[in-house]
Image (cartoon, rainbow, N blue to C red):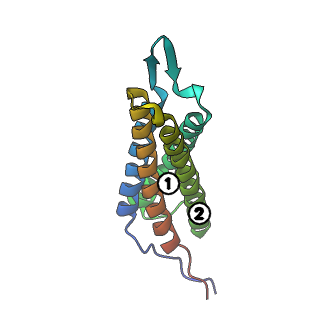
């Protein structure tokens, strides 16, 4: 006899809200870092002059793509009550959310670290924008980690 289908421990609507918050924070972070450039004297600094900021952008873009996919699955689940892929997708949600949260955390840490190192010469608008983008990426990590906890609660129960 097949085990009964798992029921989510957290409302799918709450899960959807967390995913939307993750998406919004990542989108704003990507926009801020991608448009970040500044002149210091005659020298123009762009975000892509620094590897850490490029990594930050890459983690944000990957996070946006994953979150959009998972948001679509969650919208389907909220509207129909059925999970695409059944219990198998619950494992994809869990491991994907874990991997994404770690990726976002390292992206935010890279951005914070470089900003602190560069900020020793004094604060400027370029570094303030980079710090804001890293903060938003970190906020996306927090929402992704919460989503990861929710997806762990939705894993099928095994006896």
Would residue 140 appear left or right of 158 to someone viewing this image? left
Is tag 1's residue or tag 2's residue first in the polypeptide sequence?
A: 1
Which of the 4 quarters of the picture holds residue 25? top left
Residue at numbered disc 1 = 73
Q: Quadrant of the C terminus?
A: bottom right
Q: Could you say where residue 76 lies in the image, as x and y percent from the top left?
A: 45, 55
Q: Is residue 117 above or below residue 151?
A: above
Q: Report which residue position mark 2 lands on.
A: 89
Q: Is residue 12 positioned above or below 26 on the image?
A: below
Of 106 and 92, the residue lying toward us: 106
> Is the residue under label 2 in contact with that under label 1 (CB below 8 Å)?
yes
Label 2 Cα neighbours within 10 Å, binned few <14 / some 14-19 / many ≥20: some
Give the residue displayed 55% in from the left and 35% down from the top.
Answer: 53
**Residue 16 x, y percent position in the rendering:** 39, 56
Q: Position of residue 86 (x, y in %)?
A: 57, 66
For this rendering, which residue is in front, 30 or 55? 55
Label 2 residue SS? helix
Residue 43, image x and y in percent? 51, 14
Q: Quadrant of residue 2?
A: bottom right
Which residue corresponds to the image point at 48% horizontal and 41% vertical from the top-left? 116
Residue sitting at 41 percent across and 45 percent down?
A: 135
The residue furthest front is: 121
């Amino acid at each position: 006899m097949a085990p009964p289908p798992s029921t989510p421990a957290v409302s799918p609507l709450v899960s959807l809200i967390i995913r939307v918050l993750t998406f919004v924070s990542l989108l704003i972070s990507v926009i801020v870092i991608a448009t970040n450039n500044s002149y210091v004297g005659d020298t123009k600094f762009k975000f892509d002059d620094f590897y850490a900021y490029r990594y930050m952008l890459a983690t944000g873009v990957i996070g946006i793509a994953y979150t959009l996919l998972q948001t679509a699955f969650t919208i389907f689940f909220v509207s129909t009550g059925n999970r695409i892929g059944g219990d198998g997708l619950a494992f994809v949600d869990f491991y994907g959310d874990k991997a994404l949260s770690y990726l976002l955390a390292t992206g935010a840490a890279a951005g914070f670290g470089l900003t602190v190192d560069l900020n020793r010469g004094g604060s400027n608008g370029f570094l303030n924008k980079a710090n804001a983008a890293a903060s938003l990426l970190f906020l996306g990590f927090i929402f992704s980690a919460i989503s990861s906890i929710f997806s762990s609660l939705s894993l099928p129960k095994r006896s």
